[in-house]
Amino acid sequence: MLFKNKKSSLELSIRTIVVVVLAMTLLGLGLGFIRGMFKDITGISTDVSEQVRQKILDDLITGDKKISFPKTEIKIDKGQAETLTVGVRNKKDTILHYKIRFTPISDPQGNPFNVDSPAWFQFAKDTVYELSAADSAVRNIRLSMPTSVNAGSYFLTFDVVDDDLASPNNIYDSKDFFIVVRG
């Protein structure tokens, strides 16, 4: 009887080792699968970003536009961020020196508001970009919605300012759009 107990405990030990080895193997395979999926997602997002850039450039040229802005309405939650890709095409016969600007028009109650404190948009605000005649450029701008903002619809304009001209006649082109902040 003593011999039978030793044999059972040996079988139990072997079964435990087999289960642990199988569990570790499956865990390793699962982690490898997940890591592979994330690599694929990163590659896909890079491809999509490049396709968006190309679509904006095509839109500028085929649509004979000065600027291309992705949406007329951007829906975003408080505390969230989104990258906007915008395009500018120089339709002048000379070099275009320009700045990008966002002008707030009205908040959900129809009142003026500020997008600088806290900052809603991240881009090189004071940078003067340069475009040769008939050339196009695509820029990425990050919209980060502060948590202190009230929910509702905000009306703004996206302006490309010709830095070679004096204000108020220095708007190269402009697009109206809405930012809808969700609760």
Image: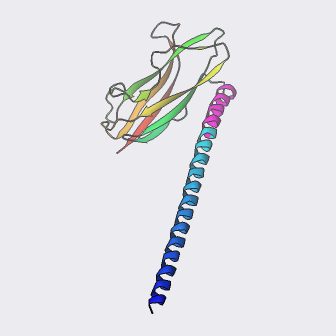
**Quadrant of the rendering where the N terminus is positioned:** bottom left
Residue at 62% in and 24% down: 65
Residue lying farthest front?
3
Image quarter of residue 121: top left
Q: Is residue 60 above or below residue 8?
A: above
Q: Depth check: give the residue in front, 148 or 28.
A: 28
Residue at 44% in and 24% down: 102
How far across and down, in percent of the image, does residue 8 sit? 48, 84
**Quadrant of the rendering where the C terminus is positioned:** top left
Colouring chosen for the image of the structure: rainbow
Residue lying farthest right?
62
How far across and down, in percent of the image, does residue 32 sit? 58, 54
Does the magenta-highlighted stretch encompass residue 53?
yes
Q: Is residue 35 above or below residue 55?
A: below
- The dominant secondary structure in magenta is helix
Q: Depth check: give the residue in front, 31 or 73.
A: 31
Q: Is residue 169 above or below residue 178?
A: above
| Magenta span | 48-63
Residue at 34% in and 26% down: 114
How far across and down, in percent of the image, does residue 85 sit? 55, 31
Report the side of 47 relative to 23 (left or right). right
Task: Tell me, yes or no, if residue 68 can be seen here.
Answer: no
Image quarter of residue 63: top right
Image quarter of residue 167: top left
Residue at 55% in and 34% down: 70
